[in-house]
Image (cartoon, rainbow, N blue to C red):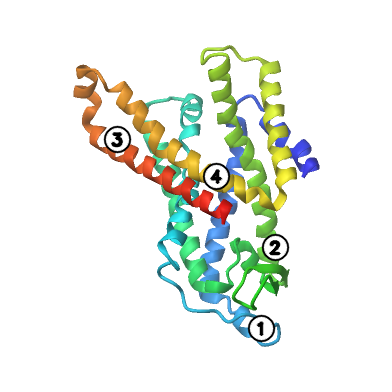
């Protein structure tokens, strides 16, 4: 982890302009599309699990559940789902990097930025689940690599997987797995660029001139802090994502945009010109508050359970 961070992640985080990261973003998009297409094809063609069920003592593929075991299990994952669409923080830096920045062009960027992940998530998620059902791992790539659970934490086939083993007899899946890991690693600098711009704007000011010492110092500090959290928590890093999804996702997606919009549209002139979305803003504000309260409440229940 340290070597990959120092050799690959940190240099990309220290690039001056966002457009310099365009090649890595395109590479990541291609990899995600290939994973999605492969997942869809495997839904119709992959019968490895059925053909090896007796020889490897695999768990039988059960029937899909259209609803969770309870309302809690369904609502609990909703903040994390919202977290997947948190792209607001990158909107202004991306707008500033456009060759001809206009509201119309940015609207197109925003539309595709949300629509493409939505289509990919839905296609891969649904077909992946209907293919493997209860034998599905948390990552679609593990099933594409023909992994299976060798040891369970409790009752066989009815408890969490404690030890898995992969056949890795699918060369294309192994290539996709390597490409996916590389795409995830190179995706960090794109998110970090928006983070650093926001930190500079808050601490120094939005009109601050570019400074290499500030640029490098903030970049090294952020990467070091992220690496420290990853090394300390290890497999428990999901706790960070769960809490971030419960608190930050509703705030960034619903609360803050609604509050800013309502504050900017307080005068009669502004209401007359931009006030058409005020009812939707109040609705989003209420939804964000409820989502945050429910998410935090469920995390506290898990914490003290």
Can you identify the residue that label 3 sits on?
A: 281
Query: Of helix, strand and loop, which one carries label 4?
Result: helix
Residue 120, horizontal then vertical, whole percent: 48, 55
Residue at point 67%, 30% (across, down): 222
Residue at point 52%, 53% (across, down): 301
Q: Nearer the viewer, residue 159 or 62?
A: 159
- Please tell me in which quadrant of the rendered image residue 155 appears: bottom right
Q: Nearer the viewer, residue 137 or 71?
A: 71
Q: Spatial distance from mark 3 to mark 1, Cα to Cα?
A: 53 Å
* Label 4: how many Cα within 10 Å (few below 14, some 14–19, many 20+): some
Q: Nearer the viewer, residue 65 or 37?
A: 65
Q: Is there any visible trace of residue 14 in the rendered image? A: no
Can you identify the residue that label 4 sits on?
A: 243
Q: Spatial distance from mark 3 to mark 2, Cα to Cα?
A: 46 Å
- Please tell me in which quadrant of the rendered image residue 220 appears: top right
N-terminal of the two: label 1 or label 2?
1
N-terminal of the two: label 4 or label 2?
2
Query: Of helix, strand and loop, which one carries label 3?
Result: helix
Quarter holding the N terminus is: top right
Can you identify the residue that label 1 sits on?
A: 52
Q: Spatial distance from mark 1 to mark 2, Cα to Cα?
A: 19 Å
Left or right for 189, reference 100: right
């Amino acid at each position: 982890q340290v070597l990959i961070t120092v050799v690959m992640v940190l240099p990309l985080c220290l690039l001056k302009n966002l457009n310099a990261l365009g090649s890595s973003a395109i590479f990541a998009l291609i990899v995600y599309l290939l994973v999605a297409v492969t997942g869809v094809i495997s839904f119709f063609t992959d019968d490895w699990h059925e053909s090896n069920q007796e020889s490897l003592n695999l768990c039988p593929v059960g029937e899909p559940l259209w609803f969770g075991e309870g309302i809690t299990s369904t609502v609990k994952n909703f903040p994390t789902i919202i977290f997947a669409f948190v792209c607001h923080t990158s909107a202004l830096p991306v707008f500033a990097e456009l060759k001809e920045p206009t509201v119309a062009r940015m609207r197109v960027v925003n539309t595709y930025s949300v629509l493409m992940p939505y289509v990919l998530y839905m296609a891969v998620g649904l077909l992946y689940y209907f293919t493997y059902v209860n034998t599905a791992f948390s990552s679609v790539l593990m099933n594409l690599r023909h992994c299976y659970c060798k040891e369970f934490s409790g009752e066989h086939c009815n408890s969490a997987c404690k030890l898995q083993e992969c056949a890795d007899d699918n060369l294309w899946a192994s290539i996709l797995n390597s490409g996916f890991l590389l795409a995830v690693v190179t995706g960090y600098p794109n998110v970090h660029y928006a983070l650093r711009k926001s930190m500079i704007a808050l601490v120094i000011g939005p009109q601050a001139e570019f400074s290499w010492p500030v640029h490098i110092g903030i970049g090294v500090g952020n990467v070091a802090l992220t690496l420290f959290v990853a090394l300390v928590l290890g497999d428990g890093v999901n706790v960070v994502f769960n809490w971030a999804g419960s608190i930050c996702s509703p705030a960034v997606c619903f609360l803050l945009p609604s509050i800013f919009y309502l504050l900017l549209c307080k005068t009669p002139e502004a209401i007359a010109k931009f006030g058409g979305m005020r009812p939707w803003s109040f609705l989003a504000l209420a939804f964000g508050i409820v989502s945050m309260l429910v998410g935090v409440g469920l995390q506290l229940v898990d914490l003290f359970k």
